[in-house]
Amino acid sequence: MSYFTFEDHNLVGADTGSITRTDVYQKFLNLHDNLRDKLRCQDYDLHGHPQKARALSTVSTTATAEPNQTLSLAYFRPYEQARMVESQMGLEINPGETGIEPQRHPVIELRLAPDYFAIELVVSPNAWWDQINFISKIDLQRHRETLRRTLYRLDADYRFGFWGGENLSDMHLTIWQLLHGRVLDEWMDTFADSQDWLRLGVWYEPESPQLSADYIIHEAATRIGELYKLYDFMLWTSNNDYHQFYQKRDKYARRMYA
């Protein structure tokens, strides 16, 4: 039996206004509770929203700040680190307020929609501090090769692209297409920080066998673990800071096109 039924998927599409009072919302919360324990056991430094009431949201990090036909759960950096990054971004946080918005950070998001269930690494344009860090890091050949090796370990179910919006875009590549020849290099050369989303994830049809009630926790924890390797690679920290390379990159580009 599937953990999320066809009725659960339909309910998300029909009634986001009062979704917090439904069984499907409680199912998702229970999944979150079980996954949180798994993540702690694996020492993944991933956390839900610091405000428990906002752990589940009808606003996905893949779209605008408006409610959409999804129910989503975002895992991202710890609260204090998130505050520090938002301070680096020049965002003022008033005392007594969390001030933390998942869209400003790389997240691993679980998303339930009428037509699918997805587990994705999402870096929105609002997470530009980390986007800059990532594209500056992979300008260095040794890190570009590390990225390639990290992606190579993923299976063919993964989808990669730069689109925004909660649904799967036709403008995506499978992991094998991405790693063919120079495709990865060519795609990353087109990536525009502060403008493009960066997406990598797995999409499941409703009631897929991998999402059975007995297997969904294992499946979700496994996918989160796979995505965490790339998340950890791109995440800005004081020990993973490549912003200086971005400044040099900018100066070089201005000289080239002056």
Image: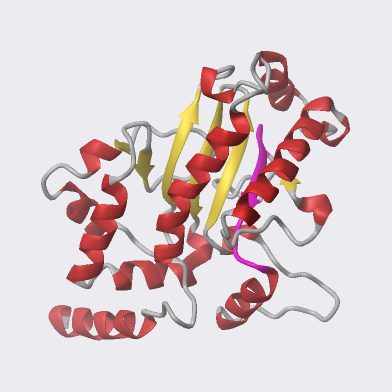
Q: Quadrant of the N terminus?
A: top right
Residue 58 visible in the shown view = no
Q: Position of residue 93 (x, y in %)?
A: 74, 78
Residue 98 visible in the shown view = yes
Q: Residue at x 23, y 37 (%)?
A: 176
Q: Position of residue 107 (x, y in %)?
A: 55, 55
Res 67 → quadrant: top right
Res 52 → quadrant: bottom right
Res 202 → quadrant: top left
Q: Residue at x 44, y 81 (%)?
A: 239
Please say whether residue 136 is one of the residues in the magenta stretch. Answer: no
Q: Residue furthest front?
A: 41
Q: Quadrant of the C terminus?
A: bottom left
Q: Residue at x 53, y 33 (%)?
A: 219
Pick the residue in front: 133 or 256: 133
Magenta segment boundaries in residue numbering: 68-78
Q: Residue at x 24, y 54 (%)?
A: 148
Against 217, residue 100 (above or below) is below
Against 155, residue 57 (above or below) is below
- Coloring applied to the structure: secondary structure
